[in-house]
Amino acid sequence: MAAVLAYGRGTVLSHLSAAALWGLLRQEGPIEVSTAAWSGRSRRPGLRLHRSTTLKRGVVTQRRGIPVTTPARTIEDLRASVSPQMVRRATRQAEIAKLPLGPAAKSDGTRSDLERDFLRLCCRYGLPAPEVNVKVRRWTVDFLWRRERVAVETDFFGYHRGRIAFQDDHARDLELRRHGLAVHRFSEEQINDHAEEVAADLRDALGLAS
């Protein structure tokens, strides 16, 4: 509130600071605020001022009494100021909290850059779009073609190495196969460096013509 008041009427909390207020990301760096005014607002230590011509009534609200950009506008601002991974994290947090998001702010359901790379691979090679991060029994499957009964898991070496991860992966695959799913696992290297082979494997699994 002090940061908003420091710049006067029409100023709202925005960008990463707005995301922190909405509970989407942690606050890092200077407090960020936005204003539609283009004069008379000098820089202040510890604050970052953004000037915007699109800061209208529909994209501002209040939270805990503090003027702030709406969740949808906050996500839009984050796209131009933080990494895609942080944008996805913020979007998923907003969806979990059931905050109102405009169509442009909706996520593709992915939880990592590797999952997004896999979706791009599907699009590039003309594969039908799968469901993303689907609950099947007690497991969450990265990608699922429900009608064809095909599931795909994408593996980071750093995340899946170790005895516990190894055992969990095999327990998951065994249970999914018992319920009629064909499980395909692809590594980061396969998805990024051998995309054509991955696509060919999936075409066969999905019963598609080459």
Image (tube, rainbow, N blue to C red):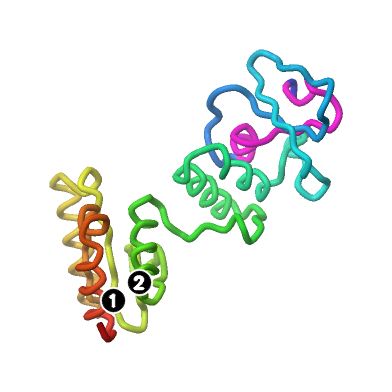
Q: Which mark is residue 113?
A: none
Report which residue position mark 2 lands on: 144
| Residue 69 x %, y % | 72, 41
180 horizontally vs 117: left or right: left
Residue appearing at x 21%, y 61% in the figure = 194
Q: The residue tagged with tag 2: helix, strand or loop?
A: strand
Q: Is residue 202 above or below residue 62?
A: below
Q: What element carries label 1?
A: strand
**Mark 2 vs 1, N-terminal side:** 2
Q: Nearer the viewer, residue 13 or 167?
A: 13
Most extreme residue toward the right, as rendered?
9
Where is residue 76? Give x, y as percent.
Answer: 63, 47
At 56% from the left and 37% from the top, the residue drawn is 81
- Horizontally, residue 59 falls left or right of residue 99, namely right
- How many dots with numbers? 2
Asked whether 128 falls inside the magenta stretch, the response is no
Amino acid tagged 2: Leu
The residue lying toward the viewer, choosing from 32 and 197, is 197
Question: Alpha carbon of mark 2 to alpha carbon of mark 1: how far?
Answer: 6 Å
Compared with 209, 61 (above or below) is above
Label 1: how many Cα within 10 Å (few below 14, some 14–19, many 20+): many
Residue under the image location 27 percent in, 62 percent down: 153
The quarter of the rendered structure image containing the N terminus is: top right
Region of the chain picked out in magenta, as a range: 3-22
Relative to 9, residue 131 above or below: below
Which residue appears at 84% of the width and 20% of the height?
40
Quarter occupied by the C terminus: bottom left
Q: Is residue 175 above or below residue 37?
A: below
**Circle 2/circle 1 CB separation < 8 Å:** yes
Q: Name the residue under label 1.
A: 150
